[in-house]
Image (cartoon, grey):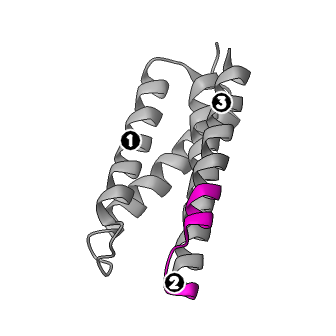
Amino acid sequence: QPLTVDIHYYYILELSFYLSVLFSRFTDIRRKDFLIMFLHHVATISLIVFSYVNNMARVGTLVMCLHDAADILIEVRTFYCKKMQRCTGAMASFYRKNMSLSVEKAISFAW
């Protein structure tokens, strides 16, 4: 599948964003979720590079959209936990359920 100019710029934008966030993790204040977020960003960068090198633009853009959606949910969870000073079981359950549904929909859409 040919890589259009728009998708090429989307890859550059996403890769530069995740690389900057990955390196800024070491200069920011360490939080409890440092390792989880570090692994999340390493996995995202690996998937972006792998899909670009192997010319799998459809799957690559899907992965980038999923990780962007996951980042939004992770930030909402982090804000909620800071605001309430604790993370409730209901919020954790809501987060897990929405993430699993998003992944299932994305996998069925890709194939």
Q: How far apart are marks 1 and 2 (CA)?
A: 26 Å
Amino acid at circle 2:
Lys
Identify the mark at residue 104; answer none if there is no mark: 3
Amino acid at circle 1:
Ala
Q: How far apart are marks 3 and 2 (CA)?
A: 29 Å
Closer to the chain start, of discs 3 and 2, is 2
Q: In terms of secondary structure, what is the magenta stretch mainly?
A: helix
Q: Nearer the viewer, residue 67 or 22?
A: 67
- Dot 1, crowdedness within 10 Å: few (<14), some or many (≥20)? few
Coordinates of residue 79 in the picture (x, y in percent): 57, 78
Q: Is residue 12 left or right of residue 44?
A: right
Identify the mark at residue 82; answer none if there is no mark: 2
Coordinates of residue 56 in the picture (x, y in percent): 55, 19
Q: Are marks 3 and 2 in contact (CB under 8 Å)?
A: no
Amino acid at circle 3:
Glu
Please give the range of residues in magenta.
Answer: 83-94
Closer to the chain start, of discs 3 and 1, is 1
Q: In this view, does 4 lie above or below 80?
A: above
* Residue mark closest to the camera, 1 vs 2: 2
Q: In this view, does 9 lie above or below 111?
A: below
Q: Are marks 1 and 2 in contact (CB under 8 Å)?
A: no
Q: Distance between the residues labelled 3 and 1?
A: 19 Å
Q: Nearer the viewer, residue 4 or 14?
A: 14
| Element at label 2 | helix
Q: Nearer the viewer, residue 56 or 111?
A: 111
Answer with the quarter of the image where residue 62 lies: top right
Question: Which residue is rendered at x = 33% and y = 75% of the image?
Answer: 31
| Element at label 1 | helix
